[in-house]
C-alpha cells in the first residue's frame, strides 16, 4: 500500500511540475505590453500564434519550455504596429510606377519622367509624389514642357496627396478631351485654366475624367507583395487601407488564404460607387484572422496643399476660394443613413473646417445618441473651435507627419487664427479619450517612427522648428504608442485580439534597436526594426 501511495505521489509531483510547451519563448526583453496599466515585461511565451504568458524571465522559464528561445538581449519590444490610415495597395502600385517624391523642382520631375521612360518604355506613364510646395517656385506646374517631351505618350502623375493631377495633351486626348474641349465646371473639383485653355492641372473630381489603362492582375499581386515587404521592414503588422475596391479586397483575401500575404488588413471599402456600398451591406461584415471588411471610406473634401479642402471662409492666400465638398450635402446624408442602418463603420476624409463641420453634423443626425459605432473622421485636420466637443462620440483618425510636412505653408493657406485649430491632436484626444494614428502613406513616408517623432516632438528631421510646432498639441510617448497600437486596434473593433502584448491576443510584436520611449527625441527617426513577428512567425 505504501509503494502505491509513493507511486501516485511521484506521478502527481511530476504532473504538477511539468512545464507547458510553447512554440516560442522570448527572454531578456524590455517589453512595453501596452495593456491597461501600460506594464512592462521581461519575457513572454507563444503557442499557436498567440501569447500564452507574459511576465518575468523567472516566471516564463519556470512554467514554459520551448525549443525556440529568443534572447532579446535587453532590446525594446512593442506590440505589432498598426497604421490606422494608409494606402497599402497604393504603396504597392506606386512601386510599379514613377516615384516623384522628394523632387525639388519641376525640372527634376521632368527628368525623372524621362529616365523612367528610358528604362520602362511605358505606353502610358503614371506616377505620384510631386509637391510644388517643396519647390523654389511654389506654383502648380503647367504642361507645355511635358507636351514637348512626350508628344504622343500619355502622362498622368498625381501630386503627393493624391488630390491634384498633372497631365499632358496626349493624356487628355486618350480620355476624349483636349486643352480646349473639357467640362467647364465639375462638382467637387476644378480644371485649372489660363486664357480659356487647360494648364494640365486637374483637382479632385476633375481627375476622374482622365482614363488610364487598368493594371494587370500580375502587377497588382506584385504590388501587394512589394507593399508587404516594405511595411514589415518598418514593424507594421496591420494596415488600415483607406479605400479599396471589391476586386482588390477579394484578391487580398485570396493571397492571405494561400499564405502569400501575411499582413493583416483592415479594409475600408471605397464608397465612391453605390454598387459597392450595396454589395457589402448586403453581404455583411467579412472577417478572418488577417482581413476585416466592416467599414466604408468616404471622401468629404480635397487636400489643403492643393486648396481643395472645404473651408468656411476663403483661403488666406487665394481670394474668394473656399475649396469644395466632393459630394452634395444631401449625398452625404444618403450614404450615412444607409451605413447607419447596417453594422458597418463610416470613415470620412475631412480636411477643411467646413468639411469637418458638415460631416460631424451628418454623423450626429444619423447616429443620434448611438454609442460604440466608432465612426471615424479621417485626418480631422482643421477644426473650428466650436466643433472639437463634437468628437465626444467620434474617433479622430489623424496622421502626425501631416503637421510637420504642412507646417511650412499651412498658415499661409488658412491664416494665423484658423491654424490654431489645425493638427490639434492633444485637443482631439481630450474629447474622445482615444486617438488613432497613421501615416497616409504613400502621401507621407511609411516609417511609423516618423509618426512617433511628429506626434511627440513635432519637428522635421532637420530639427525645425527649434521649439516644436504648436507644441500645445503634442502627444506624450505613451499616448502615441497607444495610438499606434491598442487605440488603433480599438478604432478597428479589434482591441480584443491585437494592439497589446497580452494573453490570448495574436502574437504580433516588433523588436527595435533602441528604446523609443526613453531615448532623446531627436534620435527617434533613426529607429530601426530588428525583427517583425506576425502570429509568432518572423516575417522580417
Image (tube, grey):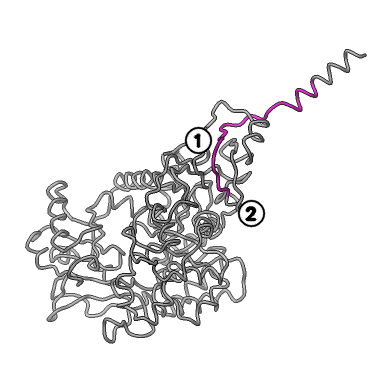
The quarter of the image holding the C terminus is: top left
N-terminal-most mark, 1 or 2: 2
Q: Which image quarter: residue 178?
A: bottom left
Which residue is at a point 19% across and 75% down the rendered structure image? 182
Which residue is at a point 26% across and 68% down the rendered structure image? 164
Residue corresponding to mark 2 = 37
Viewer-closest of 429 and 471 = 471
Residue 149 visible at all: yes
Q: Which image quarter: residue 214?
A: bottom left
Q: Are marks 1 and 2 in contact (CB under 8 Å)?
A: no
The quarter of the image holding the N terminus is: top right
Q: Which image quarter: residue 418?
A: bottom left
Q: Is residue 207 above or below residue 219?
A: below
Give percent across and percent down for residue 314: 32, 84
Magenta-colored span? 11-33
Q: Is residue 309 above or below residue 234?
A: below
Which residue is at a point 50% across and 61% down the rendered structure image? 436
Amino acid at each position: 500500500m505504501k509503494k502505491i501511495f509513493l507511486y501516485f505521489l511521484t506521478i502527481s509531483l511530476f504532473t504538477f511540475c511539468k512545464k507547458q510547451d510553447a512554440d516560442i519563448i522570448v527572454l531578456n526583453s524590455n517589453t512595453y505590453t501596452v495593456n491597461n496599466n501600460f506594464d512592462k515585461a521581461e519575457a513572454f511565451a507563444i503557442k499557436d500564434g498567440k501569447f500564452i504568458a507574459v511576465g518575468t524571465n523567472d516566471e516564463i522559464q519556470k512554467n514554459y519550455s520551448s525549443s525556440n528561445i529568443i534572447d532579446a538581449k535587453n532590446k525594446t519590444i512593442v506590440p505589432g504596429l498598426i497604421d490606422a490610415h494608409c494606402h497599402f495597395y497604393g504603396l504597392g502600385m506606386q512601386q510599379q510606377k514613377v516615384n516623384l517624391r522628394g523632387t525639388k523642382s519641376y525640372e527634376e520631375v521632368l527628368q525623372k519622367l524621362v529616365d523612367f521612360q528610358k528604362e520602362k518604355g511605358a505606353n502610358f506613364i503614371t506616377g505620384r509624389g510631386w509637391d510644388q510646395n517643396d519647390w523654389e517656385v511654389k506654383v502648380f506646374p503647367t504642361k507645355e514642357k511635358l507636351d514637348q517631351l512626350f508628344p504622343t505618350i500619355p502622362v498622368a502623375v498625381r501630386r503627393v496627396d493624391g488630390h491634384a493631377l498633372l497631365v499632358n495633351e496626349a493624356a487628355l486626348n486618350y480620355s476624349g478631351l483636349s486643352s480646349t474641349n473639357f467640362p467647364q465646371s465639375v462638382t467637387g473639383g476644378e480644371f485649372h485654366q489660363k486664357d480659356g485653355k487647360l494648364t494640365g492641372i486637374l483637382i479632385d473630381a476633375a481627375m476622374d475624367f482622365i482614363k488610364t489603362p487598368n493594371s494587370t492582375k500580375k502587377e497588382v499581386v506584385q504590388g501587394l507583395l512589394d507593399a508587404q515587404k516594405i511595411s514589415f521592414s518598418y514593424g507594421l503588422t496591420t494596415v488600415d487601407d483607406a479605400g479599396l475596391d471589391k476586386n482588390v479586397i477579394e484578391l487580398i483575401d485570396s493571397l492571405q488564404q494561400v499564405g502569400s500575404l501575411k499582413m493583416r488588413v483592415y479594409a475600408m471599402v471605397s464608397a465612391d460607387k453605390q454598387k459597392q456600398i450595396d454589395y457589402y451591406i448586403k453581404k455583411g461584415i467579412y472577417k478572418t484572422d488577417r482581413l476585416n471588411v466592416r467599414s466604408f471610406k468616404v471622401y468629404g473634401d480635397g487636400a489643403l496643399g492643393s486648396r481643395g479642402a472645404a473651408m468656411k471662409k476663403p483661403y488666406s492666400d487665394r481670394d474668394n476660394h473656399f475649396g469644395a465638398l466632393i459630394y452634395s450635402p444631401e449625398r452625404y446624408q444618403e450614404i450615412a443613413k444607409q451605413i447607419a442602418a447596417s453594422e458597418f463603420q463610416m470613415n470620412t476624409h475631412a480636411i477643411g473646417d467646413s468639411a469637418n463641420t458638415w460631416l460631424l453634423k451628418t454623423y450626429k443626425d444619423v447616429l443620434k445618441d448611438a454609442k460604440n459605432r466608432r465612426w471615424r473622421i479621417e485626418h480631422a485636420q482643421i477644426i473650428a473651435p466650436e466643433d472639437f466637443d463634437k468628437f465626444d462620440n467620434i474617433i479622430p483618425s489623424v496622421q502626425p507627419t501631416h503637421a510637420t510636412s504642412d507646417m511650412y505653408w499651412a498658415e499661409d493657406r488658412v491664416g494665423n487664427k484658423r491654424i490654431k485649430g489645425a493638427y490639434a491632436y492633444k485637443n482631439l484626444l481630450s474629447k474622445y479619450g482615444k486617438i488613432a494614428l497613421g501615416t497616409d502613406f504613400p502621401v507621407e513616408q511609411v516609417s511609423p517612427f516618423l509618426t512617433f517623432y511628429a506626434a511627440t516632438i513635432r519637428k522635421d528631421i532637420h530639427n525645425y522648428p527649434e521649439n516644436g510646432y504648436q507644441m500645445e498639441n503634442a502627444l506624450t510617448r505613451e499616448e502615441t504608442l497607444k495610438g499606434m497600437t491598442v487605440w488603433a486596434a480599438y478604432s478597428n473593433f479589434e482591441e480584443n485580439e491585437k494592439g497589446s502584448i497580452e494573453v490570448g491576443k495574436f502574437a504580433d510584436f516588433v523588436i527595435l534597436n533602441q528604446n523609443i520611449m526613453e531615448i532623446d527625441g531627436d534620435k527617434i527617426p533613426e529607429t530601426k526594426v530588428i525583427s517583425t513577428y506576425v502570429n509568432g512567425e518572423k516575417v522580417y
